[in-house]
Image (spheres, rainbow, N blue to C red):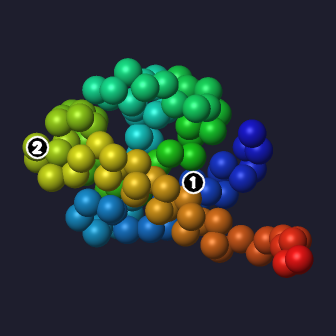
Amino acid sequence: MNKAVLNDFYGFVASQPCESCGRTPVQVAHIEGLAHGTVPGTGYYPPFAPRSHTTEAAFCCIPLCDECHQQLHKIGERKYEDIKGWPYRYLIGLALKNLVAYVNTLDLVVDVPKEK
Ligand SMILES: [Zn+2]
């Protein structure tokens, strides 16, 4: 994994408003179920190396202000739905949305295969 890319991504996430309340500044909040083991409640193991913020799992994160970040850790990702109405899969969706938004900021040169 490219640490410089990860740090650049973290910078992008940190530049966004809080996904929960819209405030700034924010922190980079990892979706821990992906970063540290099985997806809660499923027993499903992520398709990339878990248990570390230095693997692909590190890209599974969302911007949260300090208050919302602490609330998420205190309540837990599984029970967050009870408070916020956000199912766990929605947290994953938010992480993917942030990653796609970041990729779209990159000046990528891609060879697109020609149609036959
Ligand atoms: Zn917030």
Q: What amino acid is at disc 1?
A: Tyr
Q: CA distance from mark 1 to mark 2?
A: 28 Å
Along the viewing direction, whichever of 101 and 74 lies nearer the viewer: 101
Along the viewing direction, whichever of 15 and 59 lies nearer the viewer: 59
Q: Are marks 1 and 2 in contact (CB under 8 Å)?
A: no
Query: Residue at image x 61%, y 32%?
Result: 48
Query: Residue at image x 44%, y 42%?
Result: 30
Query: Residue at image x 32%, y 62%?
Result: 19
Along the viewing direction, whichever of 91 and 2 lies nearer the viewer: 91
Residue at mark 1: 10
Instruction: Classify 60 as above or below 75.
Output: below
Work out which residue is located at the far left of the displayed protein and give it.
82
Instruction: Classify 84 as above or below 109.
Output: above
Instruction: Tell me the quarter of the picture where residue 20 sits.
Output: bottom left
Residue 67 visible to the viewer? no
Q: Is residue 26 left or right of residue 88?
A: right
**Ligand 1 within 8 angstroms of badge 1 C-beta:** no
Q: Quadrant of the C terminus?
A: bottom right
| Nearer-N-terminus badge (1/2) | 1
Circle 2 crowding by C-alpha within 10 Å: few under 14, some 14–19, many from 20: few
Circle 1 crowding by C-alpha within 10 Å: few under 14, some 14–19, many from 20: many
Instruction: Classify 68 as above or below 74.
Output: below
Q: Which mark is residue 52?
A: none
Q: Is residue 74 left or right of residue 40?
A: left
Q: Quadrant of the N terminus?
A: top right
Residue 105 visible to the viewer? yes
Q: Position of residue 84 (x, y in %)?
A: 15, 52
Label 2 residue SS: helix
Residue at mark 2: 82
Q: What amino acid is at disc 2?
A: Asp
Label 1 residue SS: helix
Work out which residue is located at the far front of the displayed protein and give it.
116
